[in-house]
Amino acid sequence: MWKLFVILGAINAAAAVGFGAFGAHGLEGKLSERLMEVYQTAVQYHIMHALGLLAIGLAAAYAGSSASLGWAGGLLFTGIIIFSGSLYTMAFTGISWLGAITPIGGTAFIAGWVMLVVAVLKA
C-alpha cells in the first residue's frame, strides 16, 4: 500500500505543478479574475493533498499498512479528484453549478486527515 500512495502522491504533485505552470503562463488574460482565483484554489489544494498522499505512503512504509491509512489515502485522493477536479472544470468551462459538488471533495479531505490521526493513534 505504501508504494501506491507514494506513487499517487508523486503523480499528483507533478500534475499540480503542471496545472500551476499552465495557469500562470497559459491562462494569463484568458480567464476572468474570479475564475483565475478558482483555478489557483484548485492548484493549491491539489499540491497540499498530493503531499498528504506522500506523507501517508511514508507513514505506511514506516509503521506498516493499516485499514485506517488506506482510508486516509483513499479519501485524500478522492478529495483531489472531486474538489480540485470540480474547480479546474469550473475554471475552464465557467459552469458555476460545479461549485455545489466541491464541498464533497472538501469533506473527503477532512475525513482523510481525520483517518490519518486515527491511524497514528492506533499504531
Image (cartoon, rainbow, N blue to C red):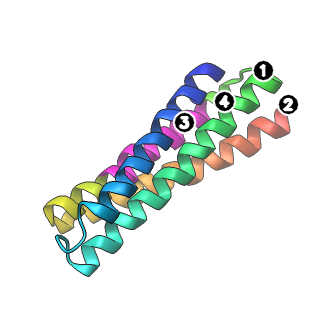
Q: What is the spatial separation of the Cα atoms under label 2 and label 1, in whole angstroms? A: 9 Å
Q: Earlier in the sequence, mark 4 or mark 3?
A: 3
Q: Earlier in the sequence, mark 2 or mark 1?
A: 1
Is residue 120 or residue 4 the one in the foreground? 4
Q: Position of residue 14 (x, y in %)?
A: 46, 41
Q: Quadrant of residue 86?
A: bottom left
Is residue 75 or residue 89 the one in the foreground? 89
> Which mark is drawn over residue 64?
1
Q: What residue lies at 33% left-to-right and 69% top-to-bottom? A: 38
Does the residue at mark 4 contact the one at mark 3 (Cβ under 8 Å)?
Answer: yes
Does the residue at mark 1 contact the one at mark 4 (Cβ under 8 Å)?
Answer: no
Q: What is the spatial separation of the Cα atoms under label 3 and label 2, in whole angstroms? A: 22 Å
* Crowding near the residue tagged with mark 1, few <14, some 14–19, many ≥20 C-alpha atoms within 10 Å: few
* Side of 44 relative to 87 (left or right): right
Q: Which residues, given as a range, are shown in magenta?
A: 71-85
Does the residue at mark 2 contact the one at mark 4 (Cβ under 8 Å)?
Answer: no
State which mark lies toward you, 2 or 4: 4
Does the residue at mark 3 contact the one at mark 2 (Cβ under 8 Å)?
Answer: no
Q: Earlier in the sequence, mark 3 or mark 2?
A: 3
Name the residue that disc number 4 marks.
57
Q: How many marks?
A: 4
Instruction: Point out the image quarter for the N terminus.
Output: top right
* Side of 72 relative to 11 (left or right): right
Q: What amino acid type is highlighted by mark number 2?
A: Ala
76 in the magenta segment: yes
Is residue 38 or residue 97 the one in the foreground? 38
Name the residue that disc number 3 marks.
9
Mark 2, secondary structure of its residue: loop
Q: What amino acid type is highlighted by mark number 4?
A: Gly
In the rendered view, tell whether residue 94 sits above or below residue 74: below
